[in-house]
Image: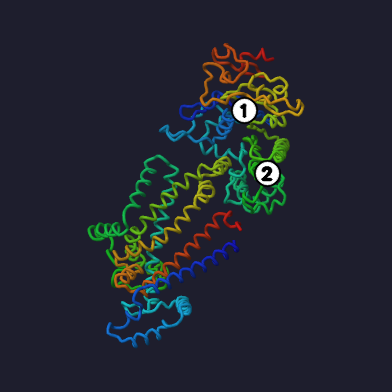
Amino acid sequence: MLRYTVKRLLQLAVALLGLSLLLFAWFKALPGGPENRMLPDNATDQQREALRQALGLDEPIWSQYGEFLSRMVHLDFGTSLSSGRPIGTELAERLPATIELSMWAIVIAVGIGIPLGYLAARRRGTWLDFGAVAGSLVGICIPVFFLAAMLKVVFAQELGWLPTTFRLSPGLTYTEITGLRVLDGLLTGEFDVVWDAARHLMLPAIALASIPLAVIVRITRASVLEVVGEDYVRTADAKGLKQTTIRGRHIMKNAMLPIVTVIGLLLGSLFAGAVLTESVFAFGGIGSFVYQATTERDYPALMGFILVIAVSYVVLNLIVDLSYGFLDPRVRVRK
Amino acid sequence: MALLEVEDLRIAFGSSTVVDGVSFHVDESQVVSLVGESGCGKSVTSLAIMGLLPKLRKSGRGGGAAVSGRAVFDGVDLFGLSADQMRRRRGADLAMVFQDPLSSLNPVVPIGRQITEVLERHRGLRGEAARKEAENLLDRVGIPDPRRRLGEYPHQLSGGMRQRVLIAIAVACAPRLLIADEPTTALDVTIQAQILELLKDLVDAEGTALLMITHDLGVVAGMCNVVNVLYSGRVVESSSASRLFAEPTHPYTVGLLGSIPRLDLPIHEPLKPIRGSIADVIRWGDGCAFAPRCDLVGAECVAGEPMLKGEAHAHRCVKAEEIA
């Protein structure tokens, strides 16, 4: 297992290096060059040259790449063109909101999707199976931004059951520890914050969970159907084991392998969905930041965003791979 | 009294009947075999006794098996038990060894756990006590260095070892009846002999009754007391092993024996295979189901349903006297 972990970590380093090369190339390929954006149109050639030297743009390309790498490693992404604040700070402020939203979305998707997919498989051909399959098809088909807007209109604006925007009601005092507000509320014992934050999270989390939920239901159903027909499940039955043991140890432990892989892939698309959901609910996460950066062509901000998303994607998939090794001994020992 | 008495067992999947009134019995400490080619209904019979066939849904859809007849084990009809009652007996009173040892073991659970879970369930052993017992079991089935093996996974073991593990699981709770469904089919010939030897030793030592499902008459000759030859879902010949080999009565049994290579025959003597293959649909009502493949077939063979005749050595052939 240790060998496997070390190998995966080395692969992670290679992936990140490749990513930095791509980002650097993209930054270099942008038309215009930063000195043109930073100086007024009537600047002289001497002024431009002076700025290029100050920015290190006259140095050889490999030393510029080295400089770029060192800045990335130190989480120095430069200053946002639109707000004028350091991008690292902007991201750090907004990241917890996105993490909290995505976390709840994936908790909903996994918490409902796996049991529902299992039940659909075990009661194949019943109304429950049919409902789960049809429902997941609908879930995949509805675009996130549309679902988010619909949920907001129906449950927040018309029925008034839940808040329409933001992460907390105005005027509520809140002590920040991790930035994940439900968790912080639980840690500090501020249960009014827990309740309020949960109410604000509910609609965006449901909207964001819809596609992963649908995919997880489908993949769980297919995976369980396959495993149930395996000889070792019959062996478990022949041993007279309790049904709960057969379900957990013999069916689900094997059925989890493809499900875990799919969850890893879904996490990537979750960030894309978060951008849309957050802007509908003015959630104040990284999503609304990137939305703003895109519309205002704030390239350094976008680059910081891409880096953060890419790194978290790579790290999350590393975790998925490691859990794969944990679940399947055959992965662990393969040389 | 017989330990297991199967009476008039019928099994149907949808409209196709695969077992059509099979009766046989297994006495205490006896080794009994069900012999026949693929599709004769021998495996389905064993699964029905174990209660492992997919249940028929109330709607009738979903491919479940309709089972009728009786399987009286130790005075209790197994088919009359609830699913839960049957669950408590499986693995404890009656256990089963399957054909393919790789696919029959869970690939992601250490073999130690796959043994201890059955000890936990039926014998209440937990923790170190269960591990100790699992180690003893592995030792009993001839696996060297059992303590280390407990933590290993099925893919780390050879085919023969895996089958030994399956046997260890089956005998873990000292069952009174062990059903072995083609236990050596997936193994090398040299390993086959070892596994049969092991099974024989275990049932001899414990006085366990063994129901051996096989297509291999060599296996039967080596270890069984009583043989039931199945064809197309019915018993066509039933007798003690020694009498069956000495005086096979049904043409199908004769055919099976004739298709085995023998060392005492001249080198270039060709084997005599049974021509044709088993039919998909069973038709015993209009006459003998084996008639289309039989060399001795006559008008009387297809003039009605042949009955099982005889007591100690029973057969289902109207021309049996001619053969004898």
Query: Where, by quadrant of the figure, is residue A106 drawn?
Result: bottom left
Q: Position of residue B239 (x, y in %)?
A: 67, 22
For disc 2, the neighbor class at 10 Å (few under 14, some 14 to 19, many from 20) is many
For disc 1, the neighbor class at 10 Å (few under 14, some 14 to 19, many from 20) is many
Q: Is residue A294 above or below residue A138?
A: below
* Tag 1 residue: B36
The answer for which chain carries disc 2 is B
- Give the amino acid type for the residue marked by disc 2 in the picture: Gly
Which residue occupies the foreground of this view, B177 or B308? B308
Q: Element at badge 2?
A: helix
Q: What is the spatial separation of the Cα atoms under label 2 and label 1, in whole angstroms?
A: 24 Å
In the rendered view, does B324 fall on the left or right side of B316? right
Query: Residue at (33%, 86%) from the top-left corner?
Result: A45
Q: Quadrant of the C terminus of chain A?
A: bottom right
N-term-proximal mark, 2 vs 1 = 1
Query: Residue at (60%, 63%) from the top-left corner?
Result: A3
Q: Position of residue B223 (x, y in %)?
A: 71, 31
Q: Is residue B294 visible?
A: yes
* Tag 2 residue: B160
Furthest residue in direction left, as rendered: A158
In the rendered view, does B29 fall on the left or right side of A331? right
Q: Is residue A175 visible?
A: no
In the rendered view, does B253 fall on the left or right side of A185? right
- Give the amino acid type for the residue marked by disc 1 in the picture: Gly
Q: Is residue A31 above or below residue B7?
A: below
Q: Position of residue A184 (x, y in %)?
A: 40, 69
Which residue occupies the foreground of this view, A278 or A45? A45
Q: Position of residue A135 (x, y in %)?
A: 35, 48
Residues at marks 2 and 1 on the same chain: yes
Query: Where, by quadrant of the figure, is residue B185 drawn?
Result: top right
Q: Quadrant of the N terminus of chain A?
A: bottom right
Which residue occupies the foreground of this view, B18 or B123? B18
